[in-house]
Image: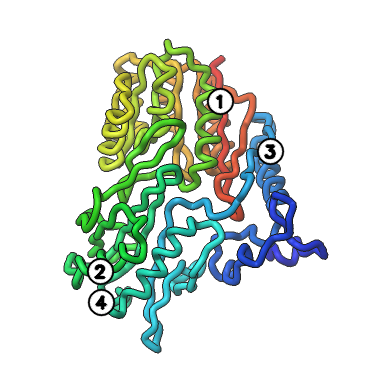
Amino acid sequence: MNNDKKYSSKKKRKTDRGEEEPDYLKCPVYRKCGGCEFRGIPYEEQLAIKENRVRRELEGLARTEKIAGMSYPYFYRNKVNAAFQRKRDGSIISGVYEAGTHRVVPVDRCLIEDQRADRIIGSIRRLLPSFRITIFNEDSGYGLLRHVMVRVGHKTGQILVILVVASPIFPSKNNFVKALRKEHPEITSIVLNINEKNTSMVLGDRNIVLYGKGCIEDILCGKRFRISPSSFYQINSVQTEVLYRKAISLAHLTGKESVFDAYSGIGTIGIAAADSARAVTCVELNANAVHDARYNARINGVRNIRFYQDDAGRFLEQMAARGERADVLFMDPPRAGSTETFIRAACSMKPDRIIYISCNPETLARDLRFFRKKGYRAKEAYPVDMFAWSGSIETVVALQRG
């Protein structure tokens, strides 16, 4: 769909604040980038489209409430990843891959990425020639630098720079770090991530800390969280608070409940809910995330929480087989949704309420139908716009047993 043609209007595009959109909010590359497929649509219309999409998918399953949009839907991404490429004339460009290709679209400033991150990536690109750092070529396998990832703590202001390289041998790394920090003293940590594999995955398994602690911290829902290079952390901190506070409020916790948090990541939901629960059990498959989650519980003084590294479905099956149960179950699966195995195991534990956080209305609807067969029904669905200017949408639903 060509959004520009469909939504073209004689009216000048305005921000959600009502003023005319200034030049610095115009993007020259969004058609090639593909990251903002709603770029040609006024923000209020985007919200209506997303809300109607959720309403259409969940018709007959749950009543869709008004979507929670952003007051300022720009520069919200706290994680920015840039690919690098050397052109035939020898110049270096950085940006994002053109949709469906591995051709890099040059991006100096993105309207949805943290501005500090974009400036740091631009500085790295300019420093590369003077340090004779080569750009990795996927076809030949020659070169060093593959990607640069920057993670920013929205509330703490801490910044982690991750240099993804094909080899641990980085020329003049100390001088490079010194030069980069001279331009950007706001950087709190720099990590060399080694990715020697021929893979589409951005990060490798090995990290070498060049400066700082090798991680950053941020504050979410009043709790402090450590974020390592590969940790999952929602990319829109402002809307994540909206989403998680709604999810926790729907759980109706009184301090007496046993809570289970599936797909728990670095423990954000479980730790945020722990103050209002008797006990919280979290399960996550990623070992690094579990390590961070345990640290996060300690620094927040949360003692009524346990973390396990395992597949969520398998773990729930084992708990159900032992006769264990939970009063409230939080689940935040990937875009593919949950599985019938997980849903069966979840229902066998007979929680009073299941709080389902979804990033895909289609798989949410599929899973709600299966939950209904098992005796769980949803009343309301609450969409939250986590990804302004894209077609993605988050939704939280509370399911009740009986």
Q: Which mark is residue 398?
A: 1
Mark 3 nearby-residue class (10 Å; few <14, some 14–19, many ≥20): many
**Residue at horizontal 28%, vertical 68%?**
179
Percent of width and height locating residue 151: 38, 52
Q: Amino acid at mark 1?
A: Ala
Report the residue marked by disc 2: 176
**Counting residues from the N terminus, which is met first, the one under dot 4 or under dot 1?**
4
* 4 or 3: mark nearer the eye: 4
Report the residue marked by disc 4: 131
Q: Quadrant of residue 339?
A: top left
Please say if the residues under marks 4 and 3 sit with CB atoms less than 8 Å apart. Answer: no
Q: Which residue is most to the right?
A: 10
Task: Determine whether the residue tagged by mark 2 lies in a helix, strand or loop.
Answer: helix
* 3 or 2: mark nearer the eye: 2
Q: Amino acid at mark 4?
A: Phe
**Residue at horizontal 42%, vertical 14%?**
257
Percent of width and height locating residue 223: 40, 31
Please say if the residues under marks 3 and 2 sit with CB atoms less than 8 Å apart. Answer: no
Mark 2 nearby-residue class (10 Å; few <14, some 14–19, many ≥20): some
Report the residue marked by disc 3: 55
Q: CA distance from mark 2 to mark 1?
A: 50 Å
**Counting residues from the N terminus, which is met first, the one under dot 4 or under dot 3?**
3
**Counting residues from the N terminus, which is met first, the one under dot 1 or under dot 3?**
3
Q: Amino acid at mark 3?
A: Arg
**Residue at horizontal 42%, vertical 28%?**
272
